[in-house]
Image: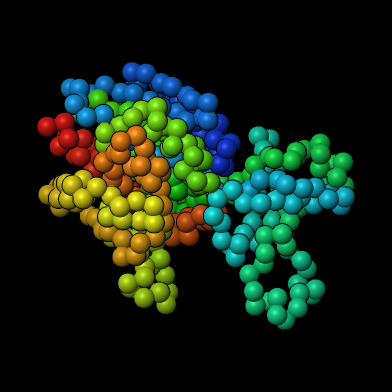
């Protein structure tokens, strides 16, 4: 699973431009599927038969897209103006490398020269329209040969293992869920399942809304990454969750109150099988679960998440031992549901 996750994190897949990620996943899972659909939005829906059919239709979901940027303007001096795709912390992007478009044009996010910054401005977070991208061009004409308005960009794709079992990469949210689903698809399952690799989660769970209408599930298992704030000077009650404390099973976030029955079932399965887990200590974040749970006549929904620091940034950090248990816990849940 770790090697798969690393490969997925190298790929570019900003919201609305998930093609590269989808193509890789499609090639990986095609030999193990019993039916594949790609809808008009770009969601990849894979059906796999298990040892026995279900009376309930089960959907397992993870999103392919990542936060990034979209080009909105080009000035006469060859600098690019942009907006963010998804929620990105402006404090952490200055000086970061960007890859733009299918040709992966390199650029760097810049800001006004320091000697032109007032004392008051030094103490504030720069506004988005104060940032620009430099691709090393000298004119608008040079830029137009490489980049077009509407092109999407992603942060630097370097991946690094460090410390005692930690991983740094962009887009661990939610390539970790995609990696877990690939691992499940490549194995024998206890029951029939539908897997959805969704698009545009970071800009409003848009792909999941279409998937829900198409699949019409009874039960949904959403695999995600979630915010860990186990950082210096953050009080314990506000850390949400912590790296090294295991997989995260939330009872609620800002978009979903999760099924109490499934929450009890999953946490008891984790305890009974020696899987380290934690829940959130604050109501924070949101996932595709919010769109899925409210679809059709309502869907029993649970999330299983990997904790990570610096989420929605060029340098997400996760602990490998936390997310490696994700496919095992899902399998245990499927076995219980199939009974």
**Residue, x 55% and y 41% (percent of image)?**
15
**Residue, x 34% and y 51% (percent of image)?**
256
**Residue, x 65% and y 78% (percent of image)?**
123
x, y (%) of residue 78?
Answer: 83, 49
x, y (%) of residue 24?
Answer: 49, 29
| Direction bottom: furthest residue | 119
Q: Determine whether 317 is above or below 18 in the image.
A: below
Q: Tell me if residue 81 can be seen.
A: yes
Q: Is residue 137 left or right of residue 22?
A: right
The N terminus lies in quadrant: top left
x, y (%) of residue 90?
Answer: 61, 62
**Residue, x 36% and y 70% (percent of image)?**
238
User: Which image quadrant is residue 250 in?
Assistant: bottom left
Q: Is residue 24 left or right of residue 119?
A: left
Q: How many marks?
A: 0
x, y (%) of residue 71?
Answer: 70, 45
């Amino acid at each position: 699973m770790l090697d798969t996750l690393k490969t997925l994190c190298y790929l570019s897949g900003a919201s609305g431009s998930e093609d590269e990620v989808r193509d890789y996943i499609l090639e990986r899972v095609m030999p193990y599927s019993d039916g594949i659909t790609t809808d008009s939005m770009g969601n990849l829906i894979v059906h796999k038969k298990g040892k026995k059919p279900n009376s309930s239709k089960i959907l397992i979901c993870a999103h392919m897209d990542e936060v990034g940027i979209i080009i909105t303007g080009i000035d006469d001096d060859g600098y690019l103006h942009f907006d963010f795709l998804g929620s990105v912390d402006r404090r952490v992007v200055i000086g970061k490398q960007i890859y733009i478009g299918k040709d992966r044009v390199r650029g760097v996010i810049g800001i006004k020269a320091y000697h032109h910054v007032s004392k008051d401005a030094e103490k504030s977070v720069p506004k988005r329209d104060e940032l620009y991208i430099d691709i090393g061009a000298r004119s608008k004409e040079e830029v137009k040969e490489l980049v077009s308005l509407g092109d999407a960009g992603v942060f630097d794709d370097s991946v690094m293992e460090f410390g005692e079992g930690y991983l740094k990469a962009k887009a661990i949210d939610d390539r970790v869920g995609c990696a877990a689903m690939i691992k499940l698809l490549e194995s024998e399952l206890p029951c029939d399942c539908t897997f959805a690799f969704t698009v545009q989660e970071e800009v409003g769970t848009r792909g999941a809304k279409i998937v829900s209408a198409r699949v019409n599930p009874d039960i949904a298992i959403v695999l995600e990454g979630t915010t860990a704030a186990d950082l210096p000077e953050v009080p314990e009650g506000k850390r949400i969750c912590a790296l090294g404390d295991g997989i995260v099973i939330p009872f609620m976030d800002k978009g979903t109150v999760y099924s109490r029955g499934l929450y009890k079932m999953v946490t008891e399965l984790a305890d009974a099988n020696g899987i380290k887990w934690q829940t959130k200590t604050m109501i924070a974040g949101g996932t595709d679960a919010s769109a899925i749970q409210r679809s059709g006549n309502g869907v029993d929904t649970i999330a299983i998440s990997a904790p990570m620091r610096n989420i929605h940034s060029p340098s997400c950090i996760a602990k490998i031992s936390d997310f490696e248990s994700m496919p095992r816990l899902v399998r245990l849940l499927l076995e219980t549901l199939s009974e």
